[in-house]
Amino acid sequence: MIASVALGLLCMEAGLRWFEESLSLDVAHIHQIPAIVEPIRDLAPETASVLFMGNSLTRHGIKPELLSRNWRGSYWIGLIYPDATALSDWYFVYRRYLADQQIRPDLLVLVTGPKHLRNRPYDPVKMGAFWVGDGDFRDVLTQRLRTIEERSVFLLSRWFTAFANRGRIAPRVYTVLFPSYQEALQRLNTAGALGGRGVEAKADYSLFESWLKDLKSSGTNLLVIAVPHEELYALDPELLALSEKYAFPILDMQAAEIYSPSLFSDGYHLSEEGGAILSERLGTVFPLPRQWKAAGMNDFKQALERHHP
Amino acid sequence: MLFNSYTFWIFFSLVFVLNWSLPHRARNLFLLLASYFFYAYWDWRFLGLIFYASILDYNVGRVMARSDRPNVRKGMLIVSIVSNLGVLATFKYLGFFVTQAQELLTLIGFHATLPVLQIILPVGLSFYTFQSMSYVIDLYRRETVPSRCFQDYALYLAFFPPLIAGPIVRSGTLLPQIENRRCMDLRTFEEGLYLVLTGLFCKVVVADNMSMISNALFNQPATALSGPDVMVATYSFAFQIYGDFAGYSAIALGTARWLGFQLIANFRQPYLAQNPQDFWKRWHISLSTWLRDYLYIPLGGNRGGERRTHLNLMITMLLGGLWHGANWTFVVWGALHGVLLIGHRRWVSSHGSDRMETPSVWKRWIKRLALFQFICLTWIFFRADSVTQAGEMLARLFSGGGPSSISLFGIGLLFFLILPLFCYECWLDKGRSPYRLLEQAWPVQSLVYLYIIGMLLFFSAPVSNEFIYFQF
């Protein structure tokens, strides 16, 4: 009996490994990250590489074809946007898929909302399944994850695809079986019944600062874009201070007169029209890669200010 | 350490391996230390309390055993009961009584501000206190033999699987198993596995998912709920508390089994009961039998005529309700069950016992459904924060309006998660053995276990809640 149960579980694991990408577009996108960034390695020296990193805000808000409409010269644009992620995920995505692979884009663009660059509790499932490479394994297991629960979940997610994806099955089944599921989910979320990683009450940017040091030492330019929300939000003074300290520009793209509520599909993400407006506007303020790359300047902020004083 | 946490299972794996590696006497010492570690992991500050209870009642037992003088034996019994109940009353009820006294004084015109201490309730206090008292009372009645080894008695009280939320184990059940050698064989392992898996299913899949619905609905003002919302909230809580408590008990029994101990079952398909008496033979069996043996029967039981019997029943159920917590809602809950039991007794005495005839299938199911509805109504009081809130929700039960999206989802979950469990329990109830599944062919067992593991893996709730009975 135990052998047959074990065999059944093995089949479950094998099946999920085989069909993992069909479980969600997000998983399919995550698996494509190595392929997305690989071309950077073989770009010609005069080609400017710009890598956008974020979450669903990026997927909805950044349209590369509109953004680069007025760009001239040779450039490459890539987008990485795993759902429901923030700095504590992006940091490890960068380390695993770029830094550890010796891939360095000319410009890394972080697309953020109000608090995505703050320290947050880590998601041990995604860290184990997708984000953490062999190089960071020990550090994450011993230093960053503090409880036995987090470490156990991290390891199980790393070893078993079924475990890593266990949170994806129920929503798909419930969506098919229960017509009211999506609406109920929103109400349960509002009522606080579904938990969630939450954001630290205090604006702690220590992880972001650690990443800034890494980027500076590797010579990677950084741009932070704050995308519009239905309601205006203020950028943390701690973030602005880091911008001064590490000399990276922040493009605050909020402009109430442009982004009316009708341009948001669900009150949070930009609609197609809203994303088009944002991308076109970005294209007007974003320095043409040719300009700052040709000048050979490492200080991207100066280049941005030179183009758009 | 929650039973559905990785921390616990890492701890238990170590305990399991070391337990079976050690010789018998060393095993008991090891289990005692492991149990104290388990308890200290919750809150080391209260280790002293359980140690105090162990020392007190062990020595009370020794004095009782050495003396035949009635006044000495009675004196020791009183010392133990007063001490145990005193500790329980201080930690669990002091704040409640002070608050109620203050409200009473205010009601009669004295505006006094009485000091209220914010006392943390030690985990498991209600359970091990009753367990310890049962030992002393059984000794007094000469229904058990005294423990001759403090280490064994301390392990009896602190044994970690049932320590936090039961079952309340009698000394006659556990002490002999502690004193004698234990062994592990395939059947023992299978029984443990069955109990642990079904327990985890009840807790992680049933209880936690149902709590998502019941909490979302109960936490709203009653005026925001429609009649169907109140019904769904009630049914969700009925299965939340059942899954939670029965699940914990099953895991406790299963882990004890894996350590070589056999504890009594605490639940036996309670929602299939056909009358209130039957319900209390199926729900929280260890508490109901404790109340029967140490409260109801000493009060006189059913030996003092009809009115006296009803009074004894009501006192027992009121105190049983109060045992759950320091809130009038629990008292009302107990009172409602008292009314139900009394009503059933009167019905049986005027219409004859059900045992005289074999009821038809339809009649059985009508009784089950009717009783289930009443039990669910009493759960409103159990779950509500106050009697007022419970009353408001009951009033909303008969209001109109359609179900909210949360309720519709809740109804869906009731069918998706509870219906298979219900069908399984109906099948189980027809058999004689709680391990009926283990008597089936291995493909059937495999399918059931794969279903359980699959549900645990893919349909556990997004958020896990603490076991409800930890607060008692």
Image: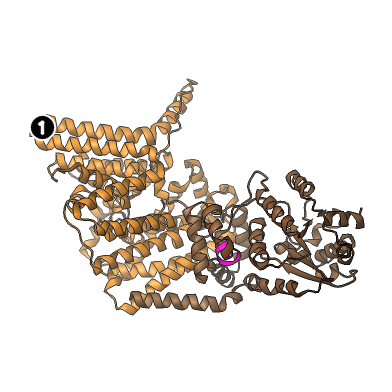
Chain colours: A brown, B orange
Instruction: Describe residue B224's horizontal placement relative to residue B345 as left or right.
Output: right
Relative depth, front residue between B203 and B2: B2
Q: Position of residue B391 (x, y in %)?
A: 49, 45
Say whether residue A131 is magenta: yes
> Is B419 covered by the magenta stretch?
no
> What's the residue at 83%, 64% (across, down)?
A279
- Report the magenta residues as a range: A127-133
Q: In the rendered image of this protein, does residue B377 appear above or below residue A44? A: above
Measured from the top left, where is residue A45 in percent x and y? Answer: 82, 71
Q: Nearer the viewer, residue A218 or B149?
A: A218
Q: Residue at x 21, y 44 (%)?
A: B151
Q: Main secondary structure of the magenta part?
A: helix
Which of the pair B37/A219 is nearer the observer? A219
Residue at left offset 27%, top offset 50%: B30
Count numbered badges in the picture: 1
Residue to which mark 1 is pinned: B70
* Chain letter of disc 1 in the image: B
